[in-house]
Amino acid sequence: METAVFIIKGELLMQSELLSMNGITKVYPNGIVANESVDFSIRKGEIHALVGENGAGKSTLMKILFGLEHPEEGEIILNGEQIQISSPNAAIDHGIGMVHQHFMLVPSLTVAENMVLGSEPKKGLYVNLKKAVAETKELAEKYNLIVDPTAKIRDLPVGIKQKVEILKALYRGAEVLILDEPTAVLTPQETKELFEELHLLKDQGNTIIFISHKLHEIKELCDRLTIMRNGKSQGVFNVSDVSEADISRLMVGRDVILKVEKEDADPGDVILDVDKLTVINDFGKQAVNDISFSVRKGEILGVAGVEGNGQGELVEIITGLKQIHFGDVRICGNNIKPLSIKEIRNLGTCHIPEDRMTYGVAESLDIEQNLLADKHDSPEYTGKFLTKPKVIRENSLKLIEEYKIKCGSPLQEVKMLSGGNIQKVVVAREFSSSPQLIIADQPTRGIDVGATEFIRKRLVELRDQGSAVLLVSADLNEVMELSDSLIVMYGGEITAYIKDTKSLNEEELGLYMLGINRQSPEEIGRAIHV
Amino acid sequence: MSNFFNIIFSVDFGYAVLRVTTPILFAAMGALISDKAGVINIALEGMMLIAALTGVIVSALAQSAGLGLLAAVIMGALVGMLLAYFALNLKTDVILAAIAINLIAMGGTVFVLFVVGGDKGISSSLPSLVLPKVTIPLINKIPVLGSILSGHNILTYGAFLSVYLMYIFIYKTPLGLRIRAVGENPHAADSVGISVKKVQYIALTLSGALAGFGGAYMSMGYVSWFSKNMTAGRGFIALAAEAMGGATPQGAMATSLLFGFFDALSNSLQSLRIPAEFVQMIPYLATVIGLVIYAASKTRQIKRIQAQKERDAQL
Ligand SMILES: Nc1ncnc2c1ncn2[C@@H]1O[C@H](COP(=O)(O)OP(=O)(O)OP(=O)(O)O)[C@@H](O)[C@H]1O
Ligand SMILES: [Mg+2]
């Protein structure tokens, strides 16, 4: 009798697992073992978090589930039956949808066109656009994800694009939704909205896998979590049973302190001086509109704002990637208008670019070459005619060690690294040149808690050593924690200057970021120092 | 000078513009569809050349102009597929593969011409046929316009029809939507299960087929023979026309007509006492000037805002 009950219980337990991946092993062609007998399973109707350090193998595991990569070993079981997922199409057929970290949308098409792409409703030979619009509307209402089906994607803010991505997966009949770092680019308000929508989805019986490096979001949103480390699963936990500190300890293997301990800033002379700068972007739109501010030696000035409100263009100008049309930018008193990027760098500027793949690394070169990219011609690394391989190797080994870049050797190609580790390569190179001015554009995007802690500490250290730091970040916690003072950008203009970041709360900041509140010109003018 | 205007404002000149625009227009449509799919086809020149020779040989052997046209188009499509195979399966650079095709076409057509026709310059020994001219009833009765619009080779009408069909295809059909998606963000297309490779294969094949029409027109309509390098850069002019036309069918048609105008002009001016070499330069010069104007219009916007700013500053 007892055994029978036990079996029934066992069966019940089995049944409640909607999907399980058993013993998944994935070895990339270069020999890196990204997943090693990983067991991962989700229950119907839950929100399940997947966390782990950079390079732990999260994306790899999810790519396997979505049919983008194929495992060497292991099986995938859906509703008690073994299935083969050979392509994204097969995953879609099994009701699995993925919202990728980088939007998979076609900018010049409308929302409705993006929605139906690949499975278009037809009217004779033509696409039935009317039906596409109607279906989009219906689905949007059902899940309370409000979008305008006829708007072009390129005109939409990131928050809406994210909704379109989720709707796209739902349109294809997804019941299991994989979300890869969906909140990285959202404001607190947008994140809140997203969480409400995800709860609604959950209530309607959908299952969600949620990847994030932000642990407080996991505490808030998720039911269970799986922790990965070094390609292996560290186990499954109920979110309510573990604290944020527990999670980071399990991920990293030690205690992590994200709260940055820093003294008040002791600002010195002005290093960066932006004077009535206006930038016209490639579409002829004024992306930055007549802004002035300065950053002093030994202070961190944060730039908060929803992505696409002129921060990108501002950074492009200061680092010389873009030509100045109107206004002036001075670094240590030198007007940079006539200077090349190299000359601007020689003034002591370093730059952690937002788009690491385009401006941060040469992806088909190895780690060592990338670490050397900005100093290959300095006498330290290059003699009269030839480079000094020994010194170069020492330097790369030292940086790999110091920044904990997870790799096989310094000769590994950068594109084979995980997203977070690529970022570490960039940061290691830029910070190692004892800079006067640091332009840090999303320096910890996609980076795990351990590495985030390290990079933030480094930024503060460099500040204390006398660097001026301009910190652009969509991560509100980050700007608020790290910056001494802060400006908020909305629609290419500065809407607020906050002299002392500690006096600010998130809600208030969010209102400035959405352009709902705005300081007086006098208050904003305090951002200029002489 | 009055001679000059007599030429431009003559009925013959109007007719000639449409006649010389035809091959450019076909090729421009070929450039358009491959561009939309994100695999720019710079082998149009070679494809036209190969198709032109194929049309002559097949029409001579089969004694059927229709079969000649069919063979030319199929040949163009096959070369398009070959380019797709190099670029998409073997992963060679699509530009390099296309250059190779252009070079092979230059030499290869002369070689085949010699083997089949016994001459390295011209196919006059082959009894090839031409495609029929069409008189459009009613329209041919309209004074002036009638003589310009009516009586063209059937492919000239085909070329203008292809602009309309291309518009419908790209903007209204599911495949067109997929082609645009693949060209703009292949990852997005991939993530919804569209095979990027398949779509690009289709685009390059269609591009080759359109170049095939253009090539067939050259040797079976424009003139009635094949001669060495007879396309004379039209495939490249078409690429310029497509880019200047803003990568839309209508725009590409407008710029193709512009290039056709200059081409016709160079033909007509040869009757005046202007050195032939100078006159032959005109269409190409027009290409360069066209591209400069295109680039300039892009920077004009910044200038305008600059002027606006300065005005604001003065106030
Ligand atoms: N295409 C590839 N070829 C070879 N190795 C790869 C490839 N993609 C990832 N790797 C390696 O596999 C490991 C796991 O990478 P993965 O992208 O799954 O990590 P992740 O957990 O998603 O990290 P992150 O949080 O940084 O995105 C890393 O060590 C990485 O270097
Ligand atoms: Mg990842």
Image (tube, rainbow, N blue to C red):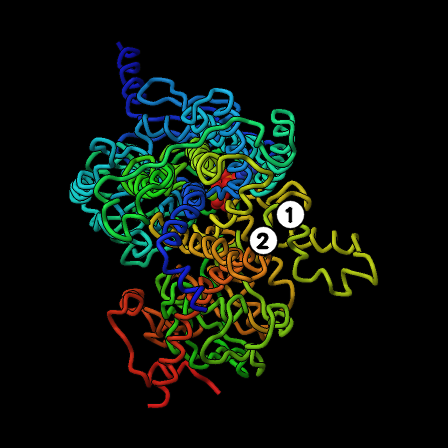
Residue type, label 1: Leu
| Left or right position of A109 against A135 | right
Q: Real-space Cα distance between discs 2 and 1?
A: 8 Å
Which of these two is toward me, A331 or B163?
A: B163
Is residue B258 shown left or right of residue A296? left
The amino acid pointed to by label 2 is Val
Neighbourhood count class around disc 2 (C-alpha, 10 Å): few under 14, some 14–19, many 20 upward: many
From the viewer's side, name the closer residue of B238 and A510: B238
Numbered circles on residues, count: 2
The residue lying furthest to the top in this view is A1
Q: Position of residue A487 (x, y in %)?
A: 39, 73
Could you tell me which chain the residue with mark 2 belongs to? A
Residue corresponding to mark 1: A365
Q: Residue at x 46, y 73 (%)?
A: A301
Tell which residue pokes out farthest to the right in this image.
A384
Looking at the picture, how far across and down is residue B89, in whole percent? Answer: 54, 30
Taking depth in this image into account, of A239 and B100 the one nearest to the observer is B100
Element at label 1 = loop
Tag 2 near tag 1, CB within 8 Å: yes
- Residue beneath label 2, please? A361
